[in-house]
């Protein structure tokens, strides 16, 4: 079995496919080393183990709306696309989504997966309660407000297998999406705050051309049925008059509706449609999360470095993320800007480019996205998370024998 990108073959000799969350307990109790598998979209060996892998994909999605309609409980193997459909049928919505809805809820939360929006936190920031099967095979429930909560939610699978989560939801809304082309870099950097706050969710797509940001996607929330007034030019960048893929020469058939046509939140917040193969298909990805106050300087440094890596880049995306309190979240405690790279699938060269990026971004305290390619040659990743010692203490308490430890955890968290 491989990950979605095909660059990692899991070496685990056994992959379990339990059909109920209750079955997960028995597998964990009987196993010496075990890890959870979500929808396999991570680009590294983060999930892998020499012991047992537990895929949650055969567990039926279960979505239960609380009577007060403020939260929903969902099984962790459910994909966001299925959850969104169920919520929409109830007239409810999530605060944000990632670029594609194919991700499993448990896996996305475990790595602090995020969308874009100055006031929008990671998908993990919506977690109100989590059910997790820990080393003894017993499920534990941890709620917002409990002492360990912020250590448990974003845990890269190192504390146990999450079986159910309770997520904050809100009344449904529509979104309209406009794409702008050819925003001058000078305007983008001089007006960075104005650009990213010009809609509820803003993404800058670039191939690191010297003069312009290729595309800016702006997503605006509307009340259901509300008409959309086009936002107009963005610092001289016109609205596109046709639908576009973030990689400009690729057919936009995979992309969600644009041209300012309003539609349900879950059909506009992701860039890619639930019923199509997302993104470029053959790719690797990396992402570095920098404190917002250093974003313009960090981007300027990457522009200067671009001749060294641009030929490997299919497209880069710059997004904003509101802070959260999860100890291992890449947005922990700071307004954050994500500098994302969709690479051509050339592993060796990509690792070289990632090492160069990490060197260049180190002065800004750039944190890597747990689910994407990074190399951490200086073995400093753990030190970028101020609560790392608390997390280590929690892991020692919950998993003293290292049942959920794997090479990735050992390499990056010690
Ligand atoms: C095409 C594509 C687009 C992407 N877009 C975005 C994006 O817009 N924003 C973004 O931030 N990221 C994005 N990602 C990265 C992706 O969100 C992360 O890699 C995420 O972890 C994938 O979730 P998954 O269920 O596939 O996890 P997996 O790859 O299956 O697992 C990842 C980690 O989560 C753990 N895990 C999985 N399920 C559980 C569980 N039930 N309990 C405990 N731990 C669990 C695993 O053990 C592992 O450590 C994208 C990836 C791809 C391939």
Image (cartoon, grey):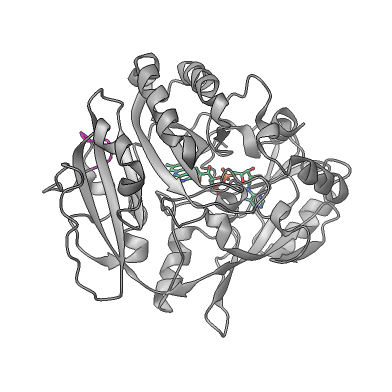
Q: On the rendering, which quadrant does ligand 1 occupy?
A: top right
**Where does residue 361 sit, x and y in percent of width and height?**
52, 26
Quarter occupied by residue 66: bottom right
Quarter occupied by residue 371: top right
Residue for point 65% across, 31% down: 381
Q: Is residue 40 above or below residue 83?
A: above
Closer-to-camera residue (115/25): 115
Quarter occupied by residue 49: top right
Q: Is residue 203 left or right of residue 257?
A: right
Magenta segment includes 186: no
Q: Is residue 34 above or below residue 357?
A: below
Magenta extent: 245-249
Residue reaching furthest to the left: 241
Specify the quadrant that holds the N terminus: top right
Which SS does the magenta portion mostly show? loop
Residue for point 52% across, 56% down: 123
Specify the quadrant that holds the C terminus: top right
Closer-to-camera residue (170/399): 170
């Amino acid at each position: 079995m491989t990950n979605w990108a095909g660059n990692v073959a899991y070496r685990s000799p056994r992959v379990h496919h339990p059909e109920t969350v209750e079955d997960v307990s028995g597998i964990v109790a009987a196993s010496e080393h075990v890890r959870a598998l979500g929808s396999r979209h991570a680009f590294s060996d983060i999930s892998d183990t020499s012991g047992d892998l537990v895929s949650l994909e055969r567990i039926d999605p279960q979505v239960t709306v609380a009577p007060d309609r403020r939260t929903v409980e969902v099984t962790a193997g459910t994909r966001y696309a299925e959850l969104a459909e169920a919520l929409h049928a109830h007239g409810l919505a999530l605060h944000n989504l990632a670029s594609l809805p194919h991700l499993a809820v448990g896996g996305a939360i475990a790595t602090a997966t995020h969308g874009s929006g100055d006031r929008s936190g990671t998908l993990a920031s919506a977690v109100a309660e989590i059910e997790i099967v820990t080393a003894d095979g017993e499920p534990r429930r941890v709620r917002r407000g409990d002492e360990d909560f912020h250590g448990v939610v974003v845990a890269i699978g190192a504390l146990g297998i999450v079986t159910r989560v309770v997520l904050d939801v809100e009344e449904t809304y529509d979104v309209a999406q406009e794409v702008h082309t050819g925003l001058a870099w000078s305007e983008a950097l001089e007006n960075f705050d104005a650009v990213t706050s010009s809609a509820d969710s803003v993404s800058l797509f670039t191939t690191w051309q010297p003069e312009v940001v290729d595309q800016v996607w702006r997503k605006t929330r509307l009340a259901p049925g509300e008409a959309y007034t086009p936002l107009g030019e963005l610092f001289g960048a016109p609205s596109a008059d046709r639908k576009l893929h973030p990689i400009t020469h690729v057919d936009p058939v995979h992309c969600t509706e644009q041209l300012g046509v309003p539609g349900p939140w879950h059909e506009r917040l992701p860039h890619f449609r639930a019923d199509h193969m997302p993104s470029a298909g053959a790719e690797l990805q990396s992402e570095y999360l920098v404190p917002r106050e250093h974003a313009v300087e960090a981007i300027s440094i990457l522009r200067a470095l671009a001749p060294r890596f641009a030929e490997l880049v299919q497209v880069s995306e710059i997004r904003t993320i509101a802070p959260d309190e999860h100890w291992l979240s890449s947005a922990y405690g700071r307004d954050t800007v994500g500098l994302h790279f969709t690479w051509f699938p050339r592993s060796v060269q990509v690792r070289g480019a990632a090492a160069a990026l990490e060197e260049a971004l180190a002065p800004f305290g750039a944190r890597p996205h747990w689910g994407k390619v990074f190399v951490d040659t200086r073995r400093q990743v753990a030190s970028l998370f101020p609560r790392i010692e608390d997390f280590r203490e929690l892991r020692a308490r919950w998993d003293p024998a290292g049942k959920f430890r794997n090479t990735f955890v050992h390499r990056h968290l010690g």
